[in-house]
């Protein structure tokens, strides 16, 4: 009897060990999986519907380990991925109602299992506007979370790299006789060989109309950024990728009116007084009037311009107060 009990105990212990090993092996290891994103067929992005102006993002899952990587991928990607976007003030964008509704409604989620061998990749393209509400023009930092066991197991999450996304004001919101606006095309982003005074004129008019794409068209952001000694030192010691991020952050700060308020201030009217330039350098002096409740503040702006490859760009400025009127 004792011998029989001993055999049963050994068998039970063996069975427990086998099931424990099986259970352990059934849990996938995602430590060698990587997720990366980039813009697909990048264009100009504006607020609006996902259909009229989509933000297509190319998503890639890669197996960087020695073993086969297996994961689930839902036919409806809303159950496999999440986009997150943040403003320069670290405010997170809200999810779309369609995404919230899908995830809170009882339904069958169809998926397939993907297997990747060492070094293999799997990619797909998603419209970020199906996930997030991009209602305001701004600069955003966008990233993706991928759920290899689907959204219901969202505690298993793979994070992607972060992209800088600029959502521009809708071109039809304003127009200017000085600035050609071709909605939905990239032509407005091509600077023209015009004189320094016209460069300054178009830049000021663009700011009056809140047309950020035209406003930055003739501004040398790199040189403007380096005008500050601390920023210049940091920029010189940074990698190419970090330098690009610094320029994007600087641009975003200008758009949010948190730095160098004089250059992004909006005059009610302006008058170009003098233009002096050689073949490569020049200055344009402008008087600008800023309206307050009971008076106008008058300022003299001196824009420093430089010509490269036939294109004049603003690389610095100075401001003198001329009193009130």
Image (cartoon, rainbow, N blue to C red):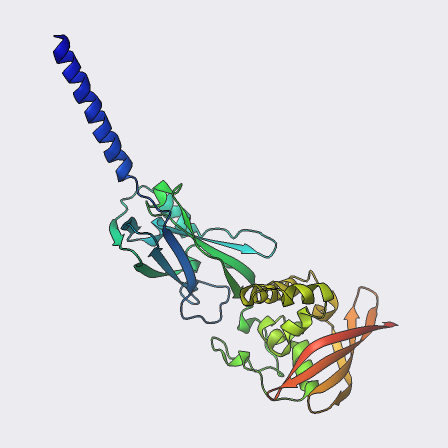
- Residue 200: image location, x then y, percent: 69, 81
In the picture, residue 171 is in which quadrant?
A: bottom right
Q: How many marks?
A: 0
- Which quadrant is home to the N terminus? top left
In the depicted view, which residue is nearer to us: 49 or 147? 147
Res. 133 in view = no
95 over 20 or under it: above or below: below
- Which residue ends up furthest to the bottom in the rendered image? 279
Residue at 46%, 57% in the rendered image = 161
- Which residue ends up furthest to the top in the rendered image? 1
Direction from residue 295 to residue 316 in the image, left or right: left
- Which quadrant is home to the C terminus? bottom right
170 over 198 or under it: above or below: above
In the picture, residue 126 is in which quadrant?
A: bottom left
Direction from residue 125 to residue 43 in the image, left or right: right
33 over 294 or under it: above or below: above
Residue at 75%, 75% in the rendered image = 317
In the depicted view, which residue is nearer to us: 301 or 29? 29
In the picture, residue 40 is in which quadrant?
A: bottom left
- Residue 74: image location, x then y, percent: 29, 51
Direction from residue 224 to residue 53 in the image, left or right: left
Residue at 61%, 79% in the rendered image = 176
Residue at 49%, 68% in the rendered image = 45
- Residue 123: image location, x then y, percent: 33, 60
Res. 316 in view = yes
């Amino acid at each position: 009897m004792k011998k029989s009990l001993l055999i049963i105990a050994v068998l039970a212990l063996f069975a427990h060990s086998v099931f424990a090993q099986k259970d352990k092996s059934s849990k996938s290891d995602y430590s060698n999986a990587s997720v990366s994103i980039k813009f697909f067929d990048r264009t100009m992005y504006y607020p609006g519907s996902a259909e009229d102006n989509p933000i297509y993002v190319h998503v890639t899952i890669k197996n960087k380990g020695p073993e086969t990587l297996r994961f689930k991928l839902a036919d409806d990607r809303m159950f496999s991925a999440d986009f997150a976007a943040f403003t320069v003030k670290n405010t997170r964008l809200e999810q779309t109602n369609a995404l919230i509704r899908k995830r809170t409604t009882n339904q069958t989620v169809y998926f397939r299992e993907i297997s990747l061998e060492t070094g293999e990749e799997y990619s797909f393209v998603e419209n970020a506007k199906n996930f997030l509400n991009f209602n305001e023009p701004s600069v955003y930092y966008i990233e993706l979370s991928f759920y290899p066991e689907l959204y219901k197991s969202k505690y298993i999450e793979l994070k992607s790299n972060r992209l800088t996304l600029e959502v521009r004001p809708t071109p039809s919101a304003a127009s200017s006789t000085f600035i050609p606006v071709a909605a939905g095309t990239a032509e407005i982003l091509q600077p023209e060989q015009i004189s320094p005074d016209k460069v300054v004129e178009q830049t000021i008019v663009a700011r009056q109309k809140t047309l950020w794409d035209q406003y930055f068209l003739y501004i040398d952001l790199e040189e403007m950024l380096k005008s500050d000694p601390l920023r210049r030192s940091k920029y010189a010691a940074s990698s190419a990728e970090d330098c690009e991020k610094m320029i994007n952050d600087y641009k975003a700060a200008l758009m949010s009116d948190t730095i160098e308020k004089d250059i992004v201030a909006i005059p009610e009217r302006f008058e170009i007084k003098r233009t002096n330039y050689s073949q490569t350098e020049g200055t344009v002096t402008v008087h600008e009037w800023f309206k307050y409740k009971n008076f106008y503040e008058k300022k003299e702006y001196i824009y420093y311009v430089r010509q490269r490859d036939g294109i004049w760009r603003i690389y610095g400025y100075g401001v003198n107060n001329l009193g009130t009127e």
